[in-house]
Image (tube, helix red, strand yellow):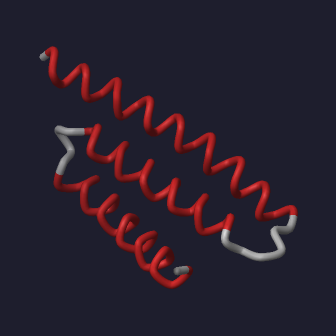
Amino acid sequence: MGTILSLLIVAAAVFAAYSLKKFYDKPYVVNFSLAAMLLLIVVRTFLLQPINTLGYVAIVLCAIAFVFQAVLGVKNLNAQQQA
């Protein structure tokens, strides 16, 4: 399970980098791909057995960043649909 999540994190990071160039006019795609990557990082960090202080810091920061990216994605999607 950990290996699959790690591969999904790498795939999400590659797609986020690709979407930065390809979908420049659709910023919500970038926001949602970054949000997915951050969520996968949070899940992967929870799977670490003894979670140390650095793991908890990563969970909190990535969870906060996930919320920000998801909110930005929704705002950008709504702005795109209204235009």
Classify residue 82 by image quadrant: top left
Tell me where residue 63 appears, x and y as whole percent. Answer: 62, 46
Q: How many marks?
A: 0
Tell me where residue 81 appears, x and y as whole percent. Answer: 15, 22
> Would you place residue 35 above or below residue 67 in this image?
below
**Closer to the camera, 44 or 72?**
44
Toward the bottom, the furthest residue is: 3
Q: Residue placed at 53% from the left, 44% from the top?
A: 66
**Closer to the camera, 67 or 49?**
49
**Closer to the camera, 83 or 21?**
83
Q: Residue placed at 43% from the left, 37% from the top?
A: 70
| 63 left or right of 48 in image | left
Q: Residue placed at 66% from the left, 66% from the top?
A: 45
| 51 left or right of 78 in image | right
Classify residue 44 by image quadrant: bottom right
Toward the top, the furthest residue is: 82
> Would you place residue 69 above or below residue 17 in this image?
above
Tell me where residue 83 appears, x and y as whole percent. Answer: 12, 17
Toward the front, the furthest residue is: 1
Q: Residue placed at 28% from the left, 53% from the top?
A: 20
> Would you place residue 60 above or below residue 81 in this image?
below
Tell me where residue 39 appears, x and y as whole percent. Answer: 52, 54
